[in-house]
Image (cartoon, grey):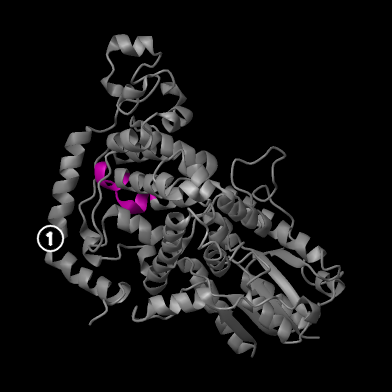
Amino acid sequence: MSCAVVWFKRDLRLTDHLPLVAAIESGAPLLLLYVVEPLLQQDRHYHQRHWHFVAQSIADMNDQLAALKHPDAHLWVVHGDVLEVLQQLHQQVSIDALYAHQEIGLANTYARDRAVQAWCDSQDIHWQQYQTAGVIRGLATRQHWDERWKQVMRSRIVAVPWHQAHWLPSTQVGQHLAAFQPTPQWLLPTTELPYQHGGSRAAWATLADFFAGRGKNYPYHISKPELSRYSCSRMSPHLAWGTISMREFYQHLLRQWHTPGWRRTLVALASRLHWHCHFMQKFESECAMEFRPVNRAYLDFPYRSDSQVSEHLHAWETGQTGFPLVDACMRCVIATGYLNFRMRAMLVSFLCHLLGIDWRAGVHHLARQFLDFEPGIHYPQFQMQAGVTGTNTIRIYNPTKQAQEHDADGVFIKRWCPELAELPTPLLAEPWRMTAMEQTLYNCKIGSDYPAPIIDLPVAAKQARDILWGYRQQPGVKRDGKRIVSRHVRPKKTA
């Protein structure tokens, strides 16, 4: 008996899933498969929080499958190398075809997929891969990319024809695929996790809550580290792990388009969804940016190499820099897995600009913290904020100014830097300016209760400006910048 295998990766849902639809319509007995890969468990980009989210999403999928009331309707979760799992399965039950979404992933998952493709070709197994959101594999130019994105996002969502499904008997599958035995990474603690919950039902509940009212202030709170936690959509982990599709999200947004008082929110959010795919397309088209600056001229950028680099990197990673907003942001994202975009940009800017540390030294640390880690978003944005593209505007974020503008009442800083809780608001952004008497009065000794600043901010900012803008003028930077624009920027329309 041959079967049709649907391989789930970062598409942990049972709706708007063309690989699933095609597998069912093939008429072959159906097997749904998720592989827990040591390749990814051991990868430096991932953290236990990611596997909790995946486990919750899989449990949600199996709850939905149980509602079909078919004894064999189940998502099989196995552990091991994907190629070995497929080989074993093929030997025992024969795989007629493999169905999956294209993964906009890291170099290791791309190499794995190429190996799977070669094996499928050798076994005469048809592997049908489907486009992920608006990202086009093998794209050489952005000509007409926007039009194609809109076409994909507005296309009809095909319902999964469950009534046509013919399931591979569970008894047959269980004889050959050992069920995954959860590791500590997967076992969920009895106490409530401080991260967003995975699964499609959680995704739709979050989206419904956004449009029920909390999203109305989205464009006004998006830059605020505290208020954004409530007013932003909070859908990024669900998009990253595919518990809802980009098309489902976008079409749901369009259905709210004429809601009175929501136009500014809807325009801003729609732009972000488009932007999301734009960055993923950049990574898909030039995935070497995982290892090097997209602008090759920055390979020789003069980052620091002195004896304090490790010490300063550790201070940044642990939220002990002596700059309250920087420390609050890092502690917050470590604890909760979420931080709004502007504060993420500030963390990268502080690392690369004000500390002068190579972006590659921090890229894995933040990937592990972001519950919504998405390779195609993470690398292009990290390099953009690090100022190594040669095309994007260089932004050196002043953490004092950011605190004064976006956490003016100090709620966020006091929440995540409780050492500063007794300080009056005017002192929160720059606690090192306190007199000895004030430090005693507010129970906060700088250098003891809270770190002294690890850099002189005005000096570091001037050095960063001089180096960054000077380097930007180099012929090599400009030359490769033109190549980048040609490849990744949509051509301007001519009259």
Where is the N terminus found, in terms of image quarters? bottom right
Q: Is residue 304 left or right of residue 104?
A: left
Q: Is residue 147 magenta?
A: no
Image coordinates of residue 197 in percent, x first then y, are 63, 49
In the picture, the quarter occupied by the C terminus is bottom left
- The magenta region covers 351-362
From this viewpoint, which residue is outermost toward the bottom?
124
Residue 450, image x and y in percent?
38, 23
Instruction: Tell me residue 70's x, y (percent).
Output: 86, 70
**In percent of the image, x 43 and y 60: which residue is there?**
267
Q: Is residue 31 above or below residue 428?
A: below
Q: Circle 1: is it few (<14), some (14-19), or many (20+) Cα within 10 Å?
A: few
Q: Is residue 361 magenta?
A: yes
Res 388 visible: yes
Residue 251 picture quarter: bottom right
Task: Give 178 or 468, whichever is nearer the viewer.
Answer: 468
Residue 476 picture quarter = bottom left
Judged from the image, the secondary structure of the residue bearing numbered disc 1 is loop
Q: Nearer the viewer, residue 128 or 226?
A: 226
Work out which residue is located at the far front of the displayed protein and give it: 260
Instruction: Please name the residue that numbered disc 1 is placed on.
Output: 473
Quick check: 99 left or right of 147? Answer: right
Residue that appears at 86% across and 67% down: 69
Q: Give the amino acid type for the residue marked by disc 1 in the picture.
A: Gln
User: In the rendered view, would you say 381 is above or below 68?
Assistant: above
Q: How many marks?
A: 1
Asked if residue 136 shows in the view, the reply is no
Q: Is residue 376 above or below residue 456?
A: below
- Residue 117 position within the rendered picture, expressed as x and y whole percent measured from the top left: 56, 82
Q: Seen in the image, is 490 located left or right of residue 363?
A: left
